Image (cartoon, rainbow, N blue to C red):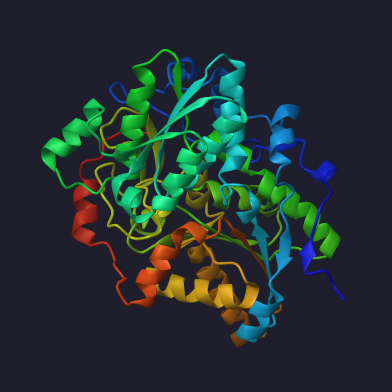
């Protein structure tokens, strides 16, 4: 009998991260200054980021060593299993082979600590003992709170207000690890006060929370900012996912034809996809699918443009697929997928035709999540349910065509802290929502015009 769970030993954990920038056919467009539109030199990022992280952000080096202290903390839950979803295959009556990389085993229950530990470590080495950040659904906030607890650091989290109230147990996790959590927009920062003055009932957005967290870092010498997705160094740290999966597919004597991940800022998709993407660049036929909500269709309906990473325009301009920095998404339960932009490296890969994007309604995602829970036993996070839905769709196509394809998706996190969303689904309170085109066009109209 073939193993259902393909496991690696602790010493099989990757010893270096993989940097996709080394293998892309062209360089990723650089960040630009918000006023002059000139490329931003790395040293300009020093007020908010640790030096080592800035170096990783601009590196073209293919392999970057993972320091042993980081690997020791990652070993609390890594290597993570690669699981053959045999029961799901049977339920779908598909000839496809479905695998999922199970990132739900980390203490916070998602893939996010893969970069949280690294970012906290590099700041700690440079003498920084306090970090600020934002969080949407709470998965990144809880991951950074966990990382700071491991390294004896302070943590301040600005949590998107709608999620702050929708997901109290994510907030409880952050408190358990010693973090201070504030609903965003707040009265604590100038950015938050500006937003509340315009809209006292604003539900918040990741772009707003980023503005507050960046401001909080800039205003204190003992604080640096950390980001849970979007930036190149975050994508880099997450590649432990795909690098482990490569070894596990060797043990299974299999290899993926289709690689799937949900996308908000892009990190969990990149973590699984980027190590395999280098094989596509080298000529192998692999399909990569990034899955997003129809209510926040960044890649499928946004434009590939330079835009701010935050709402109040504090950050450098990034070239990415964007719905506009003024985009305020509806309060869907996939809070981690409500960001207006997409990681520049993921966006550039899509622009080059290496990956594709699809969008799903939240009801069909919850339906797929329940099928997965009943067949494979794990309740997916609402964000992760988008990847589950896409994998189900790919497997159903194989049933129709008779193709025996190998499908792998990143199971980016469990939904144990999201059961309130499932209760709302069971009671019929959840609705599908496609973001109106006129609102997207209005937000896109506010984008800066940047040449190049």
Give the answer, above or below, for where 214 lies relative to 98. above
Give the answer, above or below, for where 373 lies relative to 50. below
Left/right of residue 147 with respect to residue 364 in the rendered view = right
Left/right of residue 108 with respect to residue 294 in the rendered view = right
Q: What number of labels is visible?
A: 0
Residue 321 in percent (x, y) is at: 39, 47
Residue 308 in sight from this viewpoint:
no
Residue 126 in percent (x, y) is at: 58, 15
Q: Depth check: 62 or 116 in front?
A: 116
Residue 210 in percent (x, y) is at: 36, 35
Residue 246 in sight from this viewpoint:
yes
Give the answer, above or below, for where 61 lies relative to 174. above
Q: Seen from this angle, which residue lies furthest right?
A: 1
Q: Seen from this angle, which residue lies furthest front?
A: 176
Left/right of residue 371 with respect to residue 179 in the rendered view = right
Which residue is located at x 36 percent, y 58 percent? 297
Q: Depth check: 223 or 266 in front?
A: 223
Which residue is located at x 84 percent, y 48 percent? 9
Which residue is located at x 19 percent, y 37 percent? 195
Give the answer, above or below, for where 90 lies relative to 245. below
Q: Which image quadrant: the C terminus?
A: top left
Q: Which image quadrant: the N terminus?
A: bottom right
């Amino acid at each position: 009998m073939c193993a259902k769970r393909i496991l690696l030993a602790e010493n099989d954990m990757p010893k270096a991260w993989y940097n996709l920038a080394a293998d892309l056919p062209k360089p990723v467009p650089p960040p630009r200054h918000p006023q002059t539109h000139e490329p931003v030199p790395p040293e300009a990022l020093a007020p908010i980021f640790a030096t080592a992280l800035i170096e990783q952000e601009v590196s073209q080096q293919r392999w970057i060593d993972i320091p042993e202290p980081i690997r020791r903390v990652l070993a609390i839950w890594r290597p993570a299993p690669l699981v053959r979803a045999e029961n799901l295959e049977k339920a779908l009556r598909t000839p496809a082979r479905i695998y999922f990389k199970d990132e739900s085993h980390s203490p916070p229950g998602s893939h996010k600590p893969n970069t949280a530990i690294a970012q906290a470590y590099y700041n700690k080495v440079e003498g920084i003992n306090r970090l600020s950040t934002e969080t949407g659904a709470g998965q990144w906030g809880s991951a950074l709170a966990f990382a700071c607890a491991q390294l004896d650091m302070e943590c301040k989290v600005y949590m998107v207000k709608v999620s702050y109230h929708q997901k109290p147990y994510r907030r409880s996790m952050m408190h358990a690890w010693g973090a201070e959590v504030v609903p965003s927009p707040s009265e604590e920062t100038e950015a938050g006060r500006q937003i509340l003055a315009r809209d006292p009932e604003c539900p918040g957005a990741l772009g707003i929370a980023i503005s507050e967290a960046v401001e909080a870092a800039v205003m204190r010498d003992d604080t640096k900012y950390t980001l849970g997705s979007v930036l190149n160094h975050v994508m880099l740290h997450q590649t432990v996912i795909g690098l482990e999966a490569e070894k596990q597919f060797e043990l299974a004597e299999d290899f993926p034809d289709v690689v799937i991940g949900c996308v908000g800022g892009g990190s969990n998709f990149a973590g699984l996809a980027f190590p395999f993407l280098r094989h596509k660049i080298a000529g192998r036929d692999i399909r990569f699918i990034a899955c997003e909500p129809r209510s926040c269709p960044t890649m499928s309906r946004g434009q590939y443009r330079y835009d701010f990473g935050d709402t109040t325009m504090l950050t450098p301009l990034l070239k990415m697929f964007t719905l506009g920095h003024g985009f305020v998404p509806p309060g869907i339960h996939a809070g981690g997928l409500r960001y207006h932009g997409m990681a520049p490296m993921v966006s550039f890969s899509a622009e080059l035709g290496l990956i594709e994007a699809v969008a799903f309604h939240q009801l069909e995602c919850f339906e797929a999540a329940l099928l997965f829970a009943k067949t494979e036993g794990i309740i997916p996070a609402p964000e992760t349910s988008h990847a589950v839905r896409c994998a189900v769709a790919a497997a159903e196509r194989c049933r129709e065509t008779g193709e025996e394809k190998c499908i792998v998706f990143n199971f980016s996190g469990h939904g144990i802290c999201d059961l309130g969303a499932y209760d709302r689904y069971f009671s019929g309170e959840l609705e599908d929502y496609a973001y109106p085109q006129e609102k997207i066009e209005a937000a896109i109209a506010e984008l800066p015009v940047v040449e190049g």
